[in-house]
Each structure stands twice: as C-alpha cells, then as structure tokens.
Amino acid sequence: MLDKAKKYSVGIWALKGCADRFVPGGYEGRYLSTEEAIRQVAKIEGIRAVEFASTDFDSPSDRISSVLKENNLQVAGVLVNTFCSKWKLGSLSNQDEGLRNQAIEEVRRTVRICDELGCNNITLWLGSDGFDYPFQVDYQKQLILLRETIGELAEEFPNKRFALEYKLKEPRKYLFVSSAMKALWITRKLGKDNVGVLVDFGHALMSKENPAEVICILNEEKKLFGIHLNDAYREWDDDLVVGSVNLWETLEFIYYLDKIEYKGWLSFDIFPFRMNGSRAVELCVKTMDNLIKLAEKIDKEKLAKAQSSLRADNSLAVVQEILKV
C-alpha cells in the first residue's frame, strides 16, 4: 500500500519565506538561509527529504550536504533555474546561441551540485520558454531547439533523470511544455530513457486535466518521474496546502498512486505566503496521512465492478461509503 512506501519530501522554498509582487520582502518579515530552512524541515515529522532549486545554494554544496546528513535528510531532486532575467525570452529554446549555451551551463552546474548531494533527479521547469503574443515566435524552430537541447543533455548525463515539469502559463502567457501530453510528446520524440515527466497536482488542474488520469497514462509509458503535491483553484498556480480545495480529486489521485504502485518521492510544492511554512508543511503531511487511510478503506472490488457499469452514481456510492460515521 502507498502508506508503507510513502516518502514525503518538501521544496525548501516553502520554509525559506515567500514573497509576491505586492510584498517583495515576504509576509513573515525575514528569509531563512538554506541551512536554517533545512534545520526547520528536520523538525517536521514525516518529512524524509528536501527538494532544492539551483539558486538555493547560498552555502557551498558540500556544506549543504553535511547539514542534510546531520539532520538525517535525503535529497529528492534539484530544480534548474532557467527562468531568471537573463533568460526572459527563453533558456533551452533561445535562438541566441550564447544565451542558450549559458542555460546549458546552468544545467551542468546543477548536475555537479547533484553529484555532490548524491542525487540523480533533475527537474526542468522551463518557465521562460514560451511566448506571450501571437506571431512572437517560430513554434517549429523553438520546439526543435528545445528538444535537441534536452536530448543533448540527456546524452551527456545518462546517469541523471531529467523530469519535465509542465505548466500552462506563468511567467510566460504560454509555456511550450504546458500539459502532460506535450511533455510526454517531447519525451517520446527524444526516445531517451532518462527523460520523463513530473506531475504537479496544481499544474494539472490549471491545464484542465484530471491528475489521476494523467499519472495512469504517464505510468503506462514509463515516464512518470516525479510528483509535486499541492492544491489550487484551477485558474492559477496557487500552491496551496494539499487537499485544502479539491479534496475528492486529491483522494482519487492518491488512490491511483497506490494502484499504479508509485514508489517515488511525494514532494510538497507549496508557497504559504501568509502562513508559517513549517505549520503549512505539517498540515500537508497530516492531510496526506489521513487521505491515504481513507483511500485504503475504498472497497477496490466493489469500485471496479461499479466502474465497469460506467455509471457515475454507482462509483460515487462505493466511494461515499468511506464517509460513514
């Protein structure tokens, strides 16, 4: 069952302090260093690993590695920062060869960090690779450049797993890697075993997808490389506490994570702007634990029989049995 194999991780950004464009200094009044944030994570029961961005290393990576070991924490993955100001018009898909090469070097730097941390999982969330207006870019050229660059990196580092984290929009109005199927299409075109897809629950909602269906498809294609857990109101990347809005969809997501026998990290990717970061992560852990227990109570045989009828009322009746008090 999922609860026996669960491995909770958290993006370090949830603990360091969150800012928005209205309060750039953050609502908590201060930002934690990465070392301080790691020590805060270690106090949260149930968290076994941390996820970083390549910009989080305000201390040398060997020092960060030591602090992680001191606090008995693993590294779930590292996100490459390809979305800063220099790449405002694109990183791995930029037609400016110099800028594209700089983005490639940032990926290589991230690989070196991962080697220092003993981690093989690298996330490519290509937030600046996209467009804002009709006719702004040549879609054919940009997508070819994007695929070729990712493919070259996959060949250069065959021992690393590159996960494409898709998202519909933000910071660009449209991202090239904007849906599960576009991300899957890129991986299929590349044909590299070490290039897959990371599913962010809120991103899937924003792309008008059903998160549970998505992980089933990606799992069948052997391309499900990672999970980010959070919640959202579907129109934006809200990064809310898990299960706080879309409880049924989250329960279904957990049910199918168990059904496909997912063994990877379950990583909380939240931005608690007006909430204490540690408290927000604790709520995520508690909600996941409770929903996993609820998912276990679903009668799988009865649900399978109900689903074979294709009638929603039959399926809902089975699932609602877990709500009896």
Image: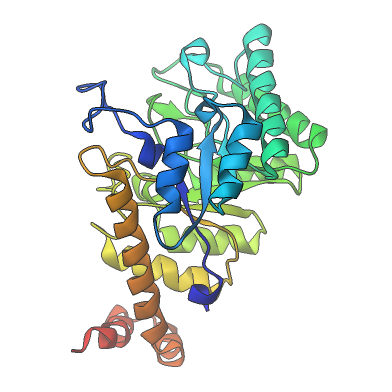
**Residue at (53%, 62%) from the top-left corner?**
7
Observer-nearest of 5 and 312: 5
Nearer to me, 276 or 296: 276
Q: Where residue 322 sits: x, y (%)?
A: 28, 85
- The image shows residue 191 at horizontal and vertical percentages of 76, 45
Residue 244: name its quadrant. bottom left
Q: In this view, does 155 lie to the left or right of 136?
A: right
Q: What residue is at 81 percent from the left and 35 percent from the top?
A: 155
* Relative to 180, 194 lies left or right: right
Describe the colour scheme in one phrase: rainbow
Residue 317 at x, y percent in the picture:
27, 86
Q: Residue at x 47, y 43 (%)?
A: 38
Can you say whether 142 is above or below 114 in the image?
above
Q: Is residue 211 above or below residue 232?
A: below
Q: In which quarter of the image is residue 32?
A: top left
Total numbered labels: 0
